Image (cartoon, coloured by chain):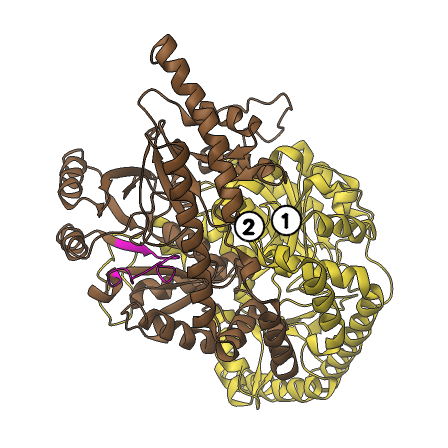
Chain colours: A yellow, B brown
């Protein structure tokens, strides 16, 4: 791996594995320090609004858990996850049209770790993962960790383009690349906010099947639609799809509980990989969520979240229209994100320090590509700040962008 | 990888990564199903006795946490772990003579995940990890996952032999092997129960240093000594040692919280690897433990655990003396485990089904070696059953072993 740029001598520089060279400080990570300053309006990190959850719902679940199954919750659990919670997840997935079996569900430390374990099962160095363009930054980091290559496929307001997918596969096959996974966030995607249309879903699945590519459907936001449900899950159309779900957005992320539904032979390996990596997911977190689902009106709580996020999305779009009317953005039907097109020649990463000086933060578009694309894009996350703060943040952002536009017009495009 | 032996067709058989071939159902895993039947005395899985923890200590911590920092506990946290908890861990490590910095601590999903992340940073295919013989089954699984080779070094009642370590290194170097890690459980080791002597500690460290081998000290049991503290931690002698600690044994495993203390360049990479794998460890689990450490008399609670485990160790040794006086066992000064020598020619793995028929379970010795050694060894874990059940379990075990001995004497050694 390359020598680190810092001044400190690393005694172990020659001992690291090749994959350690893939680790780098991401754009998103650098932003975390900024986010924590209260005067900055952060439109950056994708944090859910946990303050919309009445804490007494958690307290009641905790008390019930400790009085009935305390010793079990504090002990090691099984490597596949709690069987009661798996049954409840089965019911949650049914809301998206998925018929599953508790035997094929694996509970993980957030769906992030589910994806990490899957990537470990499938990706050798040089293998290719096909993803939307743009795609989730955390997934790109995992694929990079396993020294895989990411091929982004053209994605518009209806999601990934089937024609572009066919072309990408043909190109990769011609180059003798081994395509292992097709990674998709079909609903209210991170970072674009777009949803794969009902028409395209079976088309994409048919292309993947014809080319023997395993489809991974990552769906943390599906239940957080604003007005109407998204099209049925890919997994509801094809049992060979691996489905990732999470409690981070429909409940809270602090418990780190997600899940994977996978075909039996893959699920078996996934459980073994999980046992190797962490022995077992937290019994306490799982059983607390299980009590919550059993006792609280959790669907009503999801409705509350949907209302909160819809209001914030409206505030973000309204502010964009008011302060930056010339810029194009996606119009999400759910989830947390707007994807903003800046004029050609602008560089959202270079602009970020100026934005922070104006007390607003966002995520630069390059974070969501593995190949340097996205320079004149940026992601706005509206899930966490109040509508008033969103308005203020986008107003501040417009000052920065308009100044850049003025400079461009005066001195020409850089 | 090899085709699976089951009958089900795996559509993805040609898609798996090479490392997926390293996954196999371990001896310990197969036992979990057995353990759950109440009529079986399980001397197998290394479960702590969580019922010795007064539940109100957890409830008080929970209430305090939710009333003061609920929103923060339910949200995503930082990738390195909660800063307050890191400060408290600093104080816990000071009890073992370690002076650390909160900057160099990383909180992980159990110390298992700490080891997994470390292995990912250092191990390429074919690299060698040197370990005690026998060594922790969960560590061996991780090293196998990264396609590393494990070299077991002769270990006696004073821990790993420095002479044998020198010889092993010389042999490996002659074979042009790349030795990356020296993995040690110096206190009340799993599975042997032995402790690395004070005299050998600096000797082992000097050999590692001379050969530029990174030492990983895994110490989940150090505070669970029976009468006198173990010698000072390896990390207290050499700042280059990577130290793994855990709350699973001094509090409870259900929260899945452990920690890694590592030299700064390694720690930086460890945080990045953790963020890639799981985004962040559970804020809720960490902050709950932090409240517990701040409000409960946790050292008194550790004293309670020490008393419980000492009593159970005494019960196990007494029963071994009574029912199996001809067998040699280790005499642990702390921790959870006895390591039992069976007569030559006996096979503890082959004997296990007979033991389960007699309603007692243990872990076969081969689980703790990467190279097939340990056939005539077995591990007894005395931490979980009551002293009466331990006595009953070892009595049952003696029926099985004595029958095997009779058969051997009648028909000759197999």
Say if residue B16 shows up in the picture.
yes
Element type where label 1 sits in the image: loop
Task: Give percent across and percent down for residue B287.
Answer: 54, 73
How many angstroms separate mark 1 from mark 2 (CA)? 7 Å
- In the picture, residue B117 is in which quadrant? bottom left
Residue range (magenta): B215-233
Residue B32 as seen in the image, left or right of residue A299? left
Residue at figure coordinates x 30%, y 60% from the top left: B242
Element type where label 2 sits in the image: loop
Circle number at residue A81:
1
Instruction: Residue at the far top: name it.
Output: B411
Residue at figure coordinates x 26%, y 54% from the top left: B215
Does residue B222 show up magenta in the picture?
yes
Return the residue at label 2.
Answer: A280
Task: Give percent across and percent down for residue B121.
Answer: 36, 53
Q: Main secondary structure of the magenta part?
A: loop
Q: Are marks 1 and 2 in contact (CB under 8 Å)?
A: yes
Q: Chain of mark 2?
A: A
On screen, B410 above or below B103? Answer: above
Q: Mark 1 or mark 2: which comes first in sequence?
A: 1
């Amino acid at each position: 791996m390359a020598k680190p740029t810092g001044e400190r001598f690393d005694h172990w520089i020659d001992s690291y594995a090749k994959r350690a060279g893939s680790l780098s400080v991401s754009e998103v990570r650098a932003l975390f320090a900024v986010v924590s300053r209260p005067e900055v309006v952060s439109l950056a990190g994708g944090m859910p609004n946990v303050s919309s959850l009445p804490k007494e719902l958690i307290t009641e679940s905790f008390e019930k858990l400790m009085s009935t199954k305390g010793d079990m919750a504090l002990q090691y659990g099984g490597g596949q996850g709690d069987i009661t919670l798996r049954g409840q997840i089965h019911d949650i997935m049914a809301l998206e049209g998925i018929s599953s079996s508790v035997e094929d569900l694996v509970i993980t430390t957030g769906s992030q770790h589910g994806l990490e374990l899957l990537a470990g099962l499938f990706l050798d160095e040089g293998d290719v993962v096909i993803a939307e363009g743009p795609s989730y930054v955390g997934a790109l980091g995992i694929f990079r960790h396993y020294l895989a290559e990411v091929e982004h496929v053209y994605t518009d307001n209806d999601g990934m383009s089937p024609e572009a997918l066919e072309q990408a596969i043909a190109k990769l096959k011609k180059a003798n690349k081994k395509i292992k996974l097709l990674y998709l966030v079909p609903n209210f995607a991170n970072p674009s906010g777009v949803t794969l249309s009902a028409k395209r879903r079976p088309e994409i699945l048919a292309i993947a099947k014809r080319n023997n590519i395993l489809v991974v459907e990552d769906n943390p936001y599906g239940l957080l639609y604003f007005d109407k449900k998204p099209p049925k899950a890919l997994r509801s159309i094809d049992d060979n799809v691996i489905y990732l779900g999470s409690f981070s957005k429909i409940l809270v992320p602090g418990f780190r509980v997600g899940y994977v539904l996978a075909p039996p032979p893959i699920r078996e390996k996934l459980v073994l990989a999980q046992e190797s990596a962490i022995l077992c997911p937290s019994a306490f977190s799982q059983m607390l969520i299980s009590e919550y689902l059993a006792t609280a009106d959790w669907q009503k709580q999801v409705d509350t979240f949907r209302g909160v996020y819809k209001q914030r999305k409206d505030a973000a779009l309204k502010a964009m229209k008011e302060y930056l009317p010339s810029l194009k953005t996606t119009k999400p039907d759910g989830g947390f994100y707007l994807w903003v097109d800046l004029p050609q020649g602008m560089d959202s990463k270079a602009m970020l320090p100026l934005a922070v000086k104006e007390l607003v933060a966002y995520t630069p578009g390059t974070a969501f590509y593995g190949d340097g694309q996205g320079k004149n894009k940026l992601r706005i996350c509206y899930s966490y700040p109040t509508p008033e703060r969103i308005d203020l943040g986008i107003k501040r952002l417009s000052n920065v962008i308009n100044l850049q536009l003025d400079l461009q017009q005066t001195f020409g495009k850089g």
